Image (cartoon, grey):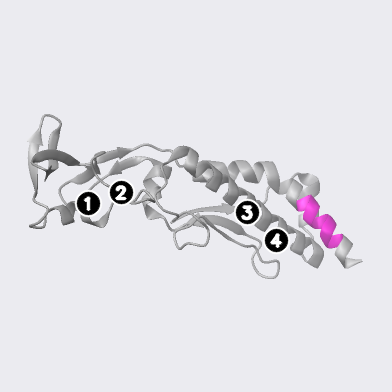
Amino acid sequence: MIRSTITIDGGKKLDKLLANLANKQVRFAVAKSLTVTAQDAQAAVLSDLPKKYTLRGKWYQPRNYMGIKITMANYKRELTSAVHTRADWMVLHETGGIKRPDGRHLAIPTSAVRRTSTGKIRTDQRPRNLFDKKAGAFISDTRGGPAIFLKVRGVARAMYWLEPRGRIRKSFGFHDTTEKIVRRRWVANFRMALRDAIRSSR
């Protein structure tokens, strides 16, 4: 899981005000502003995704299990909010590093692999399924390394390049985006939430 927790960092005046967290209106304003700031950060992360990646399906949408979600702050219990995702394959895109295969090789699809309308690889085009008796796939060495080939109308097409490992560059920017939004938006969100809380208490 990738997770960014939003913390409070105000100036001296704001810190003095936050010291009075026994005050219900102040606690409510802090919780609301943290939640709104998490929503702002969530929106920024979601906005950046299609600019950085070719997205397959809608896994990233908040309503989905792997989506970019938030944890709301609660003024009675926890003055903390967070932005997070269960999309574990994005961890290396966040940190950068070496991706290693579960078996001997990583299968890197070529342009010959057919995909669905949402961009996902078709079930019958996945490496394992290419090796059933009807498909007739085979592995052959090339100058660029081993590859999985498939004969289509008598012509062998490279479907997947087989690599022992792959280097993933740091590109997600999940934590950086969240931190930037927190620094830019939290104080303004807090002031607005506190104003609303004071008005409602009258």
Total numbered badges shown on the rendered structure: 4
Task: Give the mark nearest the N terminus, 3 or 2.
Answer: 3
Q: Residue 115 carries which label?
A: 2
Q: Check whether the beta carbons of the residues at disc 2 and disc 4 lie within 8 A of each other.
A: no
Highlighted range, magenta = 190-198
Marks 2, 4: nearer the viewer: 2
> Which of the 4 quarters of the picture holds residue 132?
bottom left
Badge 2 marks a residue whose secondary structure is loop
Identify the residue at horizontal 56%, vertical 42% (top origin): 177
Q: Check whether the beta carbons of the residues at disc 1 and disc 2 lie within 8 A of each other.
A: yes
Within 10 Å of disc 2 (Cα), the crowding (few <14, some 14-19, many 20+) is some
Prevailing SS of the magenta stretch? helix
Within 10 Å of disc 4 (Cα), the crowding (few <14, some 14-19, many 20+) is many
User: What type is the residue that disc 1 sits on?
Assistant: Gln
Residue found at the very far bottom of the displayed protein: 76
- Residue placed under numbered mark 3 in the picture: 39
Q: Check whether the beta carbons of the residues at disc 3 and disc 2 lie within 8 A of each other.
A: no
Residue at mark 1 to residue at mark 4: CA–CA distance: 49 Å
Task: Give the mark nearest the N terminus, 2 or 4.
Answer: 4
Task: Give the mark nearest the N terminus, 3 or 4.
Answer: 4
